[in-house]
Amino acid sequence: MKNVVIIGAQWGDEGKGKIVDLLSEKADIVVRFQGGHNAGHTLVVKENEFKLSLLPSGIIRDTTVSVIGNGVIIDPIHLIKEIAEIENKGIKITSEKLIISENCFLILPIHKFIDQLREKKQSSLKSKIGTTGRGIGPAYEDKIARRGIRIDDLKNKDIFFDKMKKNYEHHNIWISHSKIDIVDFENDAKNILKTFDVLKPFLKNSWNELNKYVEKKKNILFEGAQGTFLDIDFGTYPYVTSSNTVAGNASIGSGIGPSKIDYTIGITKAYTTRVGNGPFPTELDNEIGEKLAFKGKEFGTVTGRKRRCGWFDAVLIKQAVKISGISGLALTKLDVLDDFDEIKLCVAYEIDGIEISYLPVNELDQNRIKPIYFTLKGWKSKTLGTKEFSKLPSEAKIFIQKIKEFVECNIDIVSTGPERHDTIYLKEIFD
Ligand code: GDP
Ligand code: IMO
Ligand code: MG
């Protein structure tokens, strides 16, 4: 395999950062292709913990090139802070190591303002999407509406100021109708322009650079953000993010054609979590859910919010496998289940007494799903840190085997802890 896509198969936070970090040992390039700093990817390397939002998870390795692809939206003020934070941890970020696509659209301060305002205006807590409040939705809206501003626009101050003025005028129409003070563009434009000195050396024609790497037969790892059921097309709409999170977008968000992609890995936890609102068929609003949250330290990397928890949902994963053409799965956080008497797998759904084997499109139906469970005996012993499949307790082996059968996909990696070496490899991913 040369070019491998990694995506989340659930609602995000599946452990993509850990797996990308592991596999980047053999990757020459790591590319982010969608989303923005709504992502929070955690890497644990010995005593160091790195939390990355915009920087690709290859950034902490000396010899890996990290690319922020054209499909990513960038809050430049956040990005320079993230670069400084990582540099403060002793990682040097040079223009040989980091490439930022000139095509990337910017998240402007007004996008963040609108995102947070909309959430505040929702009549009830439940009707909120529960966004990360980072301006993701409004920024992607402007891109599609063709009034977005690209990072490349910062090269010309007059053009940039003119675009900022027009963009803010557009949004200020409804802001003033909402009887809220309009937002002045000039100060925001000046602040963004200040970031350009730092970001300029990293800007490149990234699709061209990436295709050169393809020609040289380098190993490329595509790092997805969010997860399949937060996808704007395939997720639990409207409780989703505003980009395509599935594997198909790796091509569009980077400029490397689909024929050049060799393998897709879907990441899934051994149970399910979700942060923010929206349907969640296997959610456990009880002490078992609390125990999963406690054992799994399920608090959001970006917003610190508590993640909702539930049993593994094979219906969702099987759907994710099909939609992204997942070649193999990485099953993470197996160790979190070390202390449960019994463990359940959702193998089908029931709505009004009728069994279905996929997630229905309608939100009302999604909320009426009754999960049908297959129950297994818990292993009640420590898998944390296990590195060999043969050393797993027999009940854990059965659990993994059953997942494989129900989702109809191979498992390539089992993760048994947050650190790099807490890993069981069942397949060699790169040649
Ligand atoms: P991402 O957004 O998909 O990269 O995932 P996050 O970093 O937001 O959340 C995953 C969390 O689980 C992080 O704190 C990881 O350090 C941690 N983690 C990853 N794999 C494992 C595992 O196998 N076991 C345990 N206990 N923690 C893990
Ligand atoms: P990583 O890459 C988990 C969720 C938010 C909210 C919805 C929309 O770390 O897996 P947005 O700010 O994107 O408009 O919010 O999507 N969300 C995530 N949930 N992990 C993420 O990223 C997420 N990024 C966005 O909580 O429900
Ligand atoms: Mg995360």
Image (tube, grey):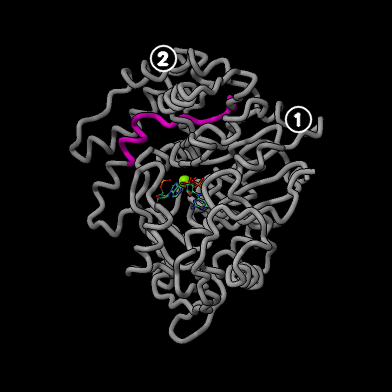
Is residue 216 visible in the rendered image? The answer is yes
Q: Do the residues labelled 1 and 2 touch (CB within 8 Å)?
A: no
Where residue 160 appears, x then y in whole percent?
Answer: 45, 18
Quarter of the N terminus within the rendering: top right
Relative to the observer, which residue lies in front, 287 or 6?
A: 287
The numbered mark at residue 299 is: none
Q: Residue at x 47, y 16 (%)?
A: 196
Q: Residue at x 44, y 17 (%)?
A: 195
Relative to the observer, which residue lies in front, 143 or 279?
A: 279
Q: Which amino acid does label 1 sit on?
A: Tyr
Where residue 10 appears, x then y in whole percent?
Answer: 52, 58
Q: How crowded is mark 2: few (under 14 residues within 10 Å), some or many (20 or more)?
A: few
Quarter of the C terminus within the rendering: top right
**Circle 1 is placed at which residue position?**
213
* Element type at mark 2: helix
**Circle 2 is placed at which residue position?**
194
- The furthest residue to the bottom: 353
Residue 73 located within the stretch drawn in magenta:
no
Q: Residue at x 29, y 47 (%)?
A: 119
In magenta, the rendered stretch is 101-115
Q: Which residue is drawn at 61% across and 18% down?
A: 95
User: How far is mark 1 from mark 2, CA to CA?
Assistant: 32 Å
Lower position in the chain sequence, tag 1 or tag 2: 2
Of labels 1 and 2, the one closer to you: 1
For residue 70, side relative to residue 229 (left or right): right
Q: Which amino acid does label 2 sit on?
A: Lys
